[in-house]
Amino acid sequence: MYRDIATTLYKRGEASMDGYEMPSWAWIVFAVNAIVFVPAFLFLSYTLQHVYPTLAVVEDPAPPAYDPISLNDDGQSFAEDGLAITDATAAATAPPAVTASLRRTYRTLYSLAGWQSLFRGFAAYLFLNVTVIAVGAAASVLPVPNFVAMPIAAVGLVRPWAAWTHIVISAPSKKYFWQRSPPFARAFRATAVPMIVYFVALELASFLPSGLATLLNISTWDPQKPNVLPQYNEHDAWKGILVILSLLATQVFLVIPAQVILTRVQASFLPEDDDTIVPFDRSFGGKVVPAIVGGKGYIGMVDAWKSLSRGSWLRIVKLYVKIFFVAVAFSFALVAVLIPEYIIIANNSRKVAEL
């Protein structure tokens, strides 16, 4: 769909400039726009929308303190100064969560390796997206709907997807992302079901709003007929609001919870020699039993859900709200700059015959 829209807009722009030549300085404007807006767009679409939420999902602002074990029956542990340390005390003295602030998260990432840390895991992310696009293209020619094909095909991505999560939440490493991929058998046992659930949620988040728009008979633009404008009526306004609300509802109640569960399950089998960049409880409240002592070495979906506190959920929701407003502000800034530039360039363009 996006390719059709882009092709149509390009043809329209080409047709509108037919017989005209832009001023020579217009290419300088285009270059400056690319230098300014492309990095900003990558930061917004990747760092803010993927790296920040992943860190927020795994962060535990008050991880359990590993103090010497007390032999008293009350179960308290004692620090070297002889004062009892309880869970309530640890929570009260814990520093604020890193991901509770966009600025604090930025400073934490930048302190690791400069601007490169802002795009940590980007190579693995590109690989995952190219693979998903290829799978989607292959599924489109098969007699299988995407709703079925995509979740099943996603199971083949359990290794690189887990590697991406581990790269994002852990300290920088000299290893390539495929070298940090966990064994397929372990990644499959741990994340096959959460991966399927996540991709089903993505498909539902796409199908339900579009299905509602079709059910309400909303007039939409057809990319196959780019010159035909849709005929709107007085009822399309409230119908559009319903579609937007359904889109937001599917994201909040389907996609985000499924993504949270998948990410926490992936983080539960992070290698022990990888240090995390945010406070992290590897045991997930004692739910993770190491494989060396007969456990699975990772948590299940139910434990991934229950181990996330109410405060953490609130912090994650606030983060998504902040990211949404940053995206809106960026969109307004983009429009406020590009439209005047287009008008100025168009006014300074001349017909070829006049040259």
Image: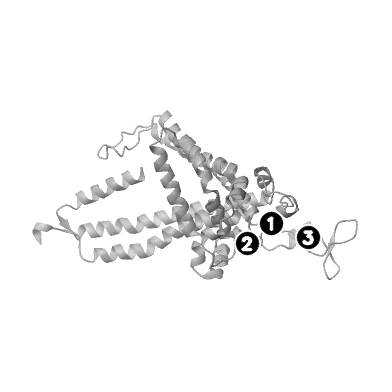
Residue 252, labelled with which disc?
A: none
Determine crowd level at label 1: few under 14, some 14-19, many 20+ residues with C-alpha closer than 10 A: many
Give the percent coordinates (x, y) of residue 163: 55, 56
- The percent position of residue 105, horizontal first and vertical second, equals 57, 62
Residue 114 falls left or right of residue 16: right
Question: 21 or 349: nearer the eye?
Answer: 21
Which is more N-terminal, label 1 or label 3? 3
How far apart are labels 2 and 3 at the CA level? 20 Å
Disc 2: which residue: 278
Report whether residue 257 is seen. Answer: no
Q: How many numbered discs? A: 3
Residue nearest the viewer, comparing 275 with 73: 275
Q: Is residue 199 above or below residue 26?
A: above
> Closer to the N terminus: mark 2 or mark 3?
3
Q: Secondary structure at mark 2?
A: loop
From the image, tell me which residue sits under label 1: 282
Give the CA separation, mark 3 to mark 1: 20 Å
Residue 184 image offset from top left, x and y in percent: 57, 50
Residue that badge 3 annotates: 89
Q: Amino acid at mark 2?
A: Val
Q: Quadrant of residue 195?
A: top right
Q: Residues within 10 Å of mark 3 (few under 14, many from 20)?
A: few
Q: Secondary structure at mark 3?
A: helix
In terms of image quadrants, where is residue 69?
bottom right
What amino acid type is highlighted by mark number 3? Thr
Q: Quadrant of the N terminus?
A: top left
- Secondary structure beneath label 1: loop
